[in-house]
Image (cartoon, rainbow, N blue to C red):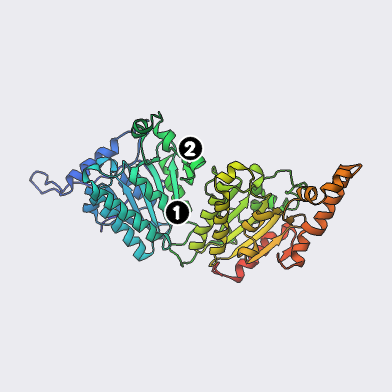
């Protein structure tokens, strides 16, 4: 193994040079890796068609890890195959890196490249180190035929085996085409660079030949499409530096492997302004929107957070943050996006996030303001029943981590159950005084239960208001849920942080 003195993730641009061997008084002796180094030097000078200079594969790997810590694995074999494989430290913790070299056969996955990547994957699994895949590949190497496909399958197999052992992050820094696109889909999180990274199974030429459709690579597999529409990507950033920084940031919230300690820091008080506004941030009327981020700002530690999939199904927030210095996973309805409603897409988004937290021991905190599941033929045809059940299953299966739930305003119907209710495994559950918990909202319930009385009433509006108030007090009140022992307590908004912190401190590891 060879340790490289590289710059850290904030220092970019300068290509590394390695002086050839020299004999005193004679001509320069060729280095045995001369051809590979020449190719890498040429890659340093390459400019993308969009005019954006990119780093070499080796520079990328070195930029991801702490300065001077990158160590090659099988250097000669991997470099000739077109991939940089090794490990380094990220914030002092070991991380395995694979970085495809687009300067060698367009980064195509051949037999040797697949072997090198699998070797790094096994190293990570055996040692319990997270894996970051830096993708820049044209797909499977055609010249290698079925051997290339066999190698790709081996990578996918180890992606799956690594899933319950170590966190895996894919960073798309160029094309990720054909068979190569399946590996990111099998990892935990995928970060794409806007206008530079693309993921697709079939490129524009094949799409045109097969379907007659004219579409650019960006339209088929760009970051905008995958981060906002398909949900295949979970974060889109502007450049390579930001992508590598995002990968480091994500790693700062998760343990090195399943069962390892969480990377905790000193506790930081929440934003004082947001904390002071907690008692008034939620409007009295259930139909008036507000920003759930304001609630989170008043409860969670100040400092860096990472919202995953912010552009996809925005009615649900999925975020890594800290509470009392400890990493936590946040699942929260966002009232300002479609009223915080659940649908097929938001259910899958939340379920994926909860599954990840459950595998790696990150406590799950759920903040609820949900009117229900989105009704209609479109959602039913999308399989909202199955996808909603996936969310239910995610909470129920994450039984190794602490799950805490706060009902902020309303929680109706099956969506109340799906949003981390005690019946599917929440360890503690609290409700704010003005919240409502019921099969449906007062308006809908009164319309069904008293339709005849309303039809015969001289003043149906006044009667509806009277019956709705009675329903809130006798059926939907959080005190009814507390009396039944379904929620632990009805608490003031300003008590939320202390209750959550106290529950987490009872289980110092964050596990049940």
Instruction: Answer left or right for 299 relative to 216.
Output: right
Circle 2 residues within 10 Å: few <14, some 14–19, many ≥20: many
Q: Which residue is disc 2 drawn over?
A: 224
Q: Quadrant of the N terminus?
A: bottom left
Disc 1 + disc 2, Cβ < 8 Å: no
Residue 85 visible in image: yes
Residue at the farthest left position: 26
Q: Nearer the viewer, residue 262 or 333?
A: 333
Q: How many marks?
A: 2
Q: Is residue 345 left or right of residue 196?
A: right
Q: Could you give the CA–CA distance between mark 1 and mark 2, rounded to whole angstroms?
A: 19 Å
Q: What residue is drawn where x is 66% and y is 48%? A: 292
Q: Position of residue 180 (x, y in %)?
A: 34, 46
Q: Position of residue 317 (x, y in %)?
A: 59, 49
Q: Earlier in the sequence, mark 1 or mark 2?
A: 1
The image's mark for residue 188 is 1
């Amino acid at each position: 193994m060879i340790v490289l003195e590289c710059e850290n993730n904030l220092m970019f641009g300068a290509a590394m040079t390695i002086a050839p061997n020299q004999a005193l008084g004679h001509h320069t002796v060729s280095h045995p890796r001369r051809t590979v180094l020449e190719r890498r030097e040429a890659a340093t000078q390459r400019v993308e068609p969009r005019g954006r200079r990119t780093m070499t594969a080796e520079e990328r790997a070195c930029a991801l890890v702490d300065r001077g810590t990158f160590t090659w694995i099988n250097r000669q074999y991997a470099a000739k195959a077109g991939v940089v494989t090794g490990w380094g430290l990220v914030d002092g913790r070991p991380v395995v890196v694979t970085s495809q070299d687009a300067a060698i056969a367009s980064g195509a996955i051949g037999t040797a490249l697949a072997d090198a990547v699998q070797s790094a994957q096994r190293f990570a699994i055996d040692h319990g180190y997270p894996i970051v895949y830096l993708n820049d590949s044209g797909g499977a190497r055609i010249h290698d035929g079925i051997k290339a496909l066999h190698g790709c399958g081996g990578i996918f197999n180890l992606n799956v085996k690594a899933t319950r052992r170590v966190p895996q992050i894919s960073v798309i820094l160029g094309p990720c085409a054909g068979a190569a696109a399946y590996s990111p889909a099998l990892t935990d999180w995928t970060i794409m660079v806007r206008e530079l990274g693309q993921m697709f199974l079939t490129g524009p030429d094949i799409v045109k030949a097969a379907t007659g459709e004219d579409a650019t690579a960006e339209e088929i597999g760009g970051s905008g499409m995958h981060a906002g529409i398909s949900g295949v990507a979970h974060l889109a950033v502007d450049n390579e530096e930001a992508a590598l920084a995002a990968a480091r940031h994500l790693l700062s919230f998760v343990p090195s492997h399943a069962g390892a300690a969480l990377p905790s820091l000193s506790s930081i008080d929440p934003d004082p302004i947001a904390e002071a506004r907690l008692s008034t941030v939620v409007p009295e009327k259930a139909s008036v929107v507000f920003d759930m981020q304001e609630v989170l700002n008043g409860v969670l530690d100040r400092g860096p957070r990472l919202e995953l999939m912010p552009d996809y199904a925005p009615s649900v927030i999925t975020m890594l943050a800290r509470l009392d210095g400890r990493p936590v996973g946040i699942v929260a309805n966002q009232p300002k996006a479609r009223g915080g409603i659940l649908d097929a897409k938001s259910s899958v988004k939340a379920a994926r996030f909860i599954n990840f937290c459950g595998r790696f021991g990150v406590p799950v905190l759920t903040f609820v303001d949900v009117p229900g599941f989105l009704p209609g033929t479109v959602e039913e045809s999308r399989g909202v029943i199955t996808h909603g059940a996936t969310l239910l299953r995610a909470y129920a299966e994450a039984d190794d981590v602490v799950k805490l739930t706060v009902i902020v305003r309303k929680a109706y119907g099956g969506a109340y159950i799906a949003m981390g209710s005690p019946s599917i495994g929440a360890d503690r559950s609290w409700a704010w005084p003005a919240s409502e918990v019921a099969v449906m909202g007062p308006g809908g319930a009164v319309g069904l239960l008293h339709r005849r009385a309303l039809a015969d009433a001289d003043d149906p509006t006044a009667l509806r208001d009277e019956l709705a108030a009675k329903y809130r007090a006798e059926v939907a009140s959080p005190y009814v849920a507390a009396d039944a022992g379904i929620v632990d307590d009805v608490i003031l908004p300003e008590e939320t942080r202390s209750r959550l912190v106290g529950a987490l401190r009872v289980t110092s590891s964050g596990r049940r």
